[in-house]
Image (tube, rainbow, N blue to C red):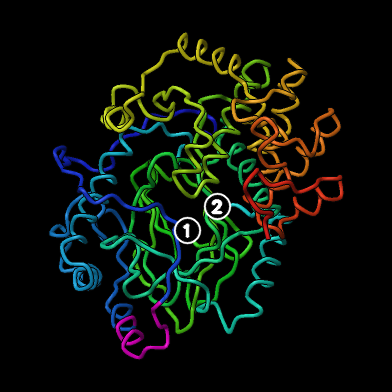
Amino acid sequence: MSGSLLVSFAVAVGVASTLAVGAVRLTSLGASLFAGLNYEDDKFHSELTEIAESSSSQYGVDRSFPMHHSADVLVANPFYNKYINGCRKKYGHLCDSTEEERIGMNLLQPTGMLNYTEPGFAKVAAPVELVEMLDKFWTTNLSPLPDVTSLPFESWASGNTYTNHWYSPTTMLHLGDELLRNKVWDTTNAELENWVGVELSPSSLYGIRVYHEGAVLAPHVDRIPLVISAIINVAQDAEEPWPLEVIGHDGKAYNITISPGEMILYESASVIHGRPFPLKGKRSFYANVFVHFEPLGISKNELSQEPNLHLAYLYQKAWKRQQAECDNDDCKLQIDFNLEEVVPPYILPGSEEEKRWIQNHPRATTTNAEEKKKKTNEYLSKLDVHFAAASGDLNLLKLIAAEDPKSLHRIDRNGWNAIHEAARGGHIEVIDYLLENGLDINQRTHKGNGGSPLWWAKKFRGTHHKIVAHMQKRGAVEVPPDGHEKIK
């Protein structure tokens, strides 16, 4: 029933509605990097082996792992006991707080979410072109290294129990190639939109996360706005399958195995998912890309029939994509255009999840159809070329220019125009479009006392970024702000 909206139901019966959510806030899945653990350590390997051998083949709600209830509902599960005790040994009581939060989210969040597909998951072949690009990127970046264990470690918050990083730390190969990142975004977006039948906006794109021998991913639901997601299998080497266990919208447990070149589509904020038993095999690994989106509340049919809605959609989608690319609060503040926060359309009205969302978003308001239409018109009246250029959304920029060609030359209070934003963002196509429309590639900011576009490009993108060479070919000259030096 792709495209229909099915109201979520609680999988558990007689659940503890007063279950408290722990105070420890999890980091997002995907993080900064650190070093210091040694895969060759004998003690490390022996502990992994002991845990792997103690696991059972029991799957299902509260069977493999605590999912809806605390650990005392498990019948003497030696694997989970070793898992959580390993965390406690490293981090103490923080592990129990995180587990309480994980279980609380599993129990309560799905009840407040709209379901966009009947089962909540699907297994498909990844598009061939995307597979080839990821494979080439993986091979090229792995070739100088001894093996996959030489990749940088991923950082997890102290006491985080979503992976057993205290035993088997994940590693990460970041997708630094902008062309590849855009391909992953766009291709996955198309696959997921066809599956769920609504327009999606980017939320988060990790690099290639690599799980190693003994790795476990605790069953969980993703935090909003990671709502509609995909796992792309890039590479693997294991002695036996390592399935993803999902609890579908029908309340049943399913095991999904994928090979390189395949992907899992899943409603990650309402479907409990995890790999609750260890990855087996010495030197084994699984390399996956995780891509997350959130629904915009606009059906594909509505989008094709409403031109104004299409413009508002492009604006909102570009804004959210720019937010998803930010890796710190300063970046997010730079592109915060003070849009009034509205409860997302994928949260059920009147649900506990809606109440929690409003509590965490002081500017938030509920909305109805008339209010939504009004806000759409407000979006249209506030379309900003600076934002379109900064986000690299050429289609949005062209639409704005079609309505008001003079807006391309608009200067903000700091003397920035669209070409400065495009240079800072590293967007070659936007630079070319703006030059074709008469903007000056050497115009300085701050009433002529600030930097030229090339100086800003170097400052934010580095001297070796492709935008720098391209701008120089187009006649750009580096002029630093008064009192500053050129970027070396």
Location of residue 17 by image quarter: top left
Q: In this view, does 67 lie above or below 48?
A: above
- Horizontal and vertical percent position of residue 237: 54, 76
Q: Considering the image in quadrants, where does the C terminus appear?
A: bottom right
Q: Which residues are the magenta region?
A: 36-48
Give the SS element for disc 1.
strand
| Residue at image point 60% right, 21% down | 312
Left-right relation of 392 to 345: right
Left-right relation of 20 to 289: left
| Residue at image point 65% right, 43% down | 482
- Horizontal and vertical percent position of residue 234: 60, 64
Mark 2 surroundings within 10 Å by alpha-carbon count, few (fewer than 14), some (14 through 19), many (20 or more)? some
- Horizontal and vertical percent position of residue 64: 28, 62
| Residue at image point 40% right, 42% down | 269
**In this figure, which residue is indicated by the disc labeled 1?**
256
**In this figure, which residue is indicated by the disc labeled 2?**
123
- Of all residues, the one furthest to the front in this rendering is 483
Give the SS element for disc 2.
strand
